[in-house]
Structure formats: C-alpha cells, structure tokens
Image (cartoon, rainbow, N blue to C red):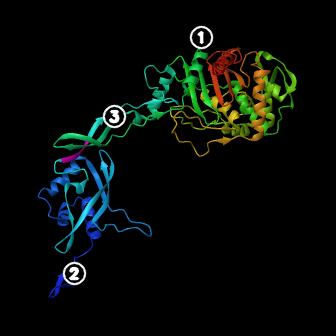
Amino acid sequence: MAGPLVPVIAAGGVIWALRTEGAPEETAGKYLTAWSDRNYAAMRALVADPPPDFESLNKRFFTDLKLTHADFSIPRATGVFAGPAVGDDGVATFHARLTGARDWDYDGKLQLVERDHTWKVAWTPATIHPLLTQDRTLRVITQQGDPLQVLAADGTPVNTPDAPGSVQQLVEGMRQTYPDRFKAQNRARIDLYQDDKFVRTVVPAPKVRPLRTTIDLKVHRAGAAAMEGVSKPASLVALRASTGEILAVVNKPGGFNRALLGKYPPGSTFKIVTASALVAGGVRPSEQVTCPGEKNIGGFPFHNAGFEDFGSLTFQEAFAHSCNTTFGEMSVSQLGGKRLGEVARSFGFGTVIKPGVPAVRAEFPDPKDDTDLASAAIGQGRVLASPLNMASVAAAIASGAWIAPRLVKDEPTSSDNPRPLEPAVISALRKLMPAVVTDGTAAAVHFPAGTAGKTGTAEYGSGAEPPAHSWFIGYRDDLAFAVIVEGGGAGSAVAAPIAARFLDALS
C-alpha cells in the first residue's frame, strides 16, 4: 500500500507526491532472512535492477564454499547512543556466519536505495562478499593435513623415530586414547580467484593442534641412564609432586608398559599408607612399639626380613627398618580393614586414573580377616599397584595432597582432585620417610641430601623363600618417583641404588 500524499512546495504552487513506503531497516532485514533461507526469489524481489544471473551467482557462492548452512543478520545496536542499523548513507552492515567445509564469519554491507517509492537493495557481487566482482570468486580448497605433533613439555616433538623408546611407547598409548586426534585430517582454506587464477588465500586452513605432554626429556634421560646395566625387567616413573604431571616413564625392556599397566604387590612401600592411617589415629613417630623377628597374626606367622628382631623401638624406627611384625600387628589392633581401606582410597587406591594413556588403578580389596589385613598392611596379599600408582603415593607426602597423575596437559581432572592429606599425617611422614634413607633400610645407599623414601621387597609366588620384586619410592623437593625391578629381590639392594643414580643425574 502506498504512503499518504505529502505536499512539496514548488514555484507556482503545491505539487503532491507519494512518501517512500516502509523503512530501509525493514528491507535489509527481509533480504537477509531470505538469504539465510536461500529463498532467491524473495531476495530478487527486494533488489533494485537485479542482473539476469542474480540467482546463479548467489548459488555459486554456496557451492564454491561447500556450505551446509549460512546465517546473515544485522547485529543489534546496543547502548544509549547506539546509532541506527542503517546509516545516513543507506548502508547496513551485516554479519555472516558460514558453516561448511571451512567455517567462516565475516562482515558485509548492503546498500539501500529508494526505488519506486520503496526501499531496495542496490545489488552487486560485492553484496555477497566485499572481495567479489563479476570475475572474482571465493572457493574452498581442501588440503591434506599436517601430521599431528606430540610434544614434550619443552616443545620438542616426541612422535619421531629418534625419540626414546619408552617415550614412543607413551605415544602409542596416546594414540589409543585419542584416536581421532591421530587420524589424518583434511584441512580446508578459502582462496580468492580471478578468472580462475589464484589471487590469495583469504581464510587459511586451521592449524593442527599439537598434543602437548608433561614429559621432561632431561628427567626421562636421567631415568633411562640410571637403569643401564639392569638385566631384569624394570621401570621408573617420575612426577612433579605439586601438579601430578608425569615427567618420565622408563621401561626396560620395551614391549610392555609395566610402569603404567603393571600390577604388582607394592610390598613395604605400602607402609606409607599404613603409617598414615596409624598417625591419623593418634600414633606419634616417637611412640614406643615392639618389633619381634616373627609374630603370629590371625594364625599365620609374619616375619621381618631375615627374621631380624629389633625389640623395643620408636614407631619412626620401626618404619625406617620396615618392621613387618610391627605394622601387621598394629593394623589389626588399632586400624581394622575398613579404616585402612579409607586411607588407601585417599591415596588413590580404587580410583580410575586417566592420565592420557592407558593406566591401571591401584587395588585394595576389603580384607577378609586379620591375616588378610596384616598382609595388606605390609603391601602383600591382594593389594596391587603400578609404579605410577606408587609414585603418586610418594608425591602425596611431598605435596600434601594426592593428585591424579596426568601426561597430557589438557586432560581434565576430576572434581575431587587434589585430595588434601591431614596435616598431622604430612608432618609425620615427612619425618618417617627421610629416616629410611638416613638410618633405615636404605642407609647404605648414597642418596643426595634431602631425599625421602621407602624400600619395598614384595614377595610373589610360593615356596619357603618366594621370589620378590624390588621397590623404592620417594621424593626430593618437588620430584616424586617410583622404581621397580621385577624379581630383583631386596629393595635396598637393587631398586634404591637405581633411584640414587637417577637423583644424582639431576642434582
């Protein structure tokens, strides 16, 4: 419907004229809505003097960019002094959001003009995009993506043939965890052409986001060097205690990632957990306890290494000398299976860990009876853990909280991470663990000053003198670690010297 007649003053009298119908904002809005819907007939009706190839040019834009969806709109003006959507020059700025082979946002302009008493769009190819002309087009070009880079903490690529074997093993583990990240990706860019000749790239292809790990190659090399000459299967794991970041994972030989997937009885290294439960229950490091060479608990004889009898001594000394009879008896008389299980869970036992590669969780089954409880208290029986699990236990004492370990930097953590330990537990274990190195089972090994740890000799199999895995776990400053040698025997004789060489290499 035409607008009302309005007077226009002219020489010789009054001339009556028709006012322009509607508003430029209304036309711009209708045009952009029709464009978003790909309603080319409605678009044409809103254009002043549309060219014969109007529809084919607009369709080609969608086809050349391989679009699946497009949205065109005028951003809402905001604020007290916000200007109109269409300026005094009749230009409306719109925002385009394109979805397709290469997602893209850009801003364009609609020129609004008065034509036959209505507002129309003065259309040119530049209305579609400012770079377009009759002989210029925009095209999406698909290219083969660059291979994914897996990076160490310092940015060094580690998914390369010259990376250490144990690190390549971790890369394979990441490939299992993030299969889509490792697939060859087709990458799309948008180029400008003139008469089918390339002019320039307008929208570059997205970069392949690298997989960033926490691996510290210096720490890793120190761990690998420390295990040179070890003839039996062995593993070393090192963590940054304050963050849970995995700094090194060394497996010798390769083939099986025993550091993350191996499940072993932790032996006396588990006494860190048992001691924490006892301290939380009121036991002081200076408290007097007894350590007979052998003691019957629940009808089963428990004995110390070599049946050594330490008589009466402090709890700290019993920990340092790794008294099986002391810890077995105290777990039954003062803890109980439920309480020890609670404390074990505070150190990550039973918790699924997702560091970015396959890894097992530590297991602490509910003890069936007193004998089962006493066995669990000294890391035997049905208690199982990986070197990574036990390195996390040492890290908890160093940092004051159990923190789920992680290898991939952008791996999300759970809501209960970290899990703070009780202040009394932290204080006591930071006295007990150094005593192992200075006065206890590892006193004969020359560790750097400030080292705290725990030896472990974890029996497996059967017989009067069953074979044993050699363990040592500990921390120094913010570095926590675990070492295991399968069938290596006494932790003080085999695993502890490896740990000392490792720390010496980093000093």
Q: Which residues are magenta?
A: 136-140
Say which mark, if any, is on residue 229.
1
Q: Mark 1 or mark 2, which has the lower sequence index?
A: 2
Q: Nearer the viewer, residue 290 or 28?
A: 28
Q: Which residue is mark 3?
A: 145
Q: Which is closer to the viewer, label 1 or label 3?
A: 3
> Where does the C terminus fall, quadrant-wise?
top right
- The location of residue 61, given as percent across then percent down, is 22, 51
- The location of residue 22, given as percent across then percent down, is 25, 75
> Label 3: how many residues lie within 10 Å, few (<14), some (14-19) or many (20+)?
some
- The location of residue 295, given as percent across then percent down, is 81, 23
Asked whether, in this view, residue 444 is left or right of residue 41, the answer is right
Callout 1: SS: loop
Asked whether, in this view, residue 457 is left or right of residue 131, the answer is right
Measured Cα–Cα span from mark 1 to mark 3: 43 Å
Callout 2: SS: loop
The reply to whether the C-beta atoms of the residues labelled 1 and 2 are less than 8 Å apart is no
The reply to whether the C-beta atoms of the residues labelled 1 and 3 are less than 8 Å apart is no
Q: Nearer the viewer, residue 227 or 331?
A: 227
Indicate whether residue 501 is drawn in magenta.
no
Q: Nearer the viewer, residue 78 or 367?
A: 78
Q: Mark 1 or mark 3, which has the lower sequence index?
A: 3
Three-letter amino acid code at disc 2? Gly
> Where does the N terminus fall, quadrant-wise?
bottom left
Q: Which residue is mark 2?
A: 3
Residue at figure coordinates x 62%, y 25% from the top left: 264
Callout 3: SS: loop
